[in-house]
Image (spheres, helix red, strand yellow):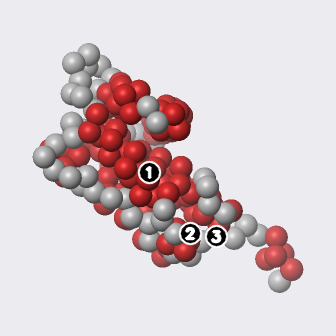
Amino acid sequence: MIFGLFKKKKHNRVIVDRQYAALTSAARTPVFYTDLGVPDTVMGRYEMLSITMILFFRRTAKSPTSGQELAQEIVDAFFQDLDHSIRELGIGDQGVPKRMKKLAGMFYGRLETYAKALDAGDLGELAKGLARNIYPENQSAPDMARLAAWMAEAERHLAVTPEDDIARGNAVIPQPLAG
């Protein structure tokens, strides 16, 4: 019994699953792919999942310890999903760790790039970073200004999300408008 006092508290799996499902659902919103220039491809979906995870991660960085722990559990779930998806795509067991390392590096690189632009309130720089990441081999990427503006709006929305909603796994990422 005493050993349980020193265990790191894990969130209720229902809370983690509910919040993770809300974040992945937000990333799958069709308007990102039809109106905001994100390609509806495996990598385009990875980009949108990364963006929603980054927005949530940034919000919970300002939360008490329990919110930060929840964010870590959700990011862990994200990488477990990526691992599973890579395996479903037919990548052999020996290739998975290499791909996962690359995807993790991409994620944390995006976190740093987007955080710098969001912290500075520089939507132009954010749009440039989005274009570079979403279209890495395309010099004529579509303008990402609307996606950058949505990210800033989503961050403002999350900033006023009550801690209670965060702790219960009820944070909502707002959907962008079509058009």
Q: Which mark, by number, is residue 124?
A: none
Identified by mark 1, the residue type is Glu
Q: Which mark is residue 155?
A: 1
Q: How many neighbours does mark 1 have within 10 angstroms: few (below 14), some (14-19), or many (20 or more)? A: many
Q: Are marks 1 and 2 in contact (CB under 8 Å)?
A: no
Residue 10, labelled with which disc? 3
Q: CA distance from mark 1 to mark 3?
A: 26 Å
The kind of secondary structure element at disc 2 is helix
8 displayed left or right of 142: right
Q: CA distance from mark 3 to mark 2?
A: 17 Å
Residue at the extreme bottom? 1
Instruction: Please tell me whether mark 1 or mark 3 is closer to you in this view.
Output: 1
Sequence-earlier tag: 1 or 3: 3
Residue 176 in the figure: left or right of residue 110: left
Q: Nearer the viewer, residue 15 or 100?
A: 15
Which comes before the other along the chain, label 1 or label 2?
1
Residue 94 image position (x, y, % from top left)? 48, 37
Front residue (pair 9, 80) = 9
In the displayed structure, 47 sits above or below 56; it is above
Residue visible at 50% across and 57% down in the picture: 159
Residue at 69% from the left image edge and 70% from the top image edge: 9
Q: Is residue 129 visible?
A: no
Q: Earlier in the sequence, mark 3 or mark 2?
A: 3
Q: Give the residue type at disc 2.
A: Glu
Mark 3 element type? loop
Residue identified by numbered label 2: 163
At a point 44% along the width and 66% down the height, the residue shown is: 171
For this orientation, the residue located farthest to the right is 2
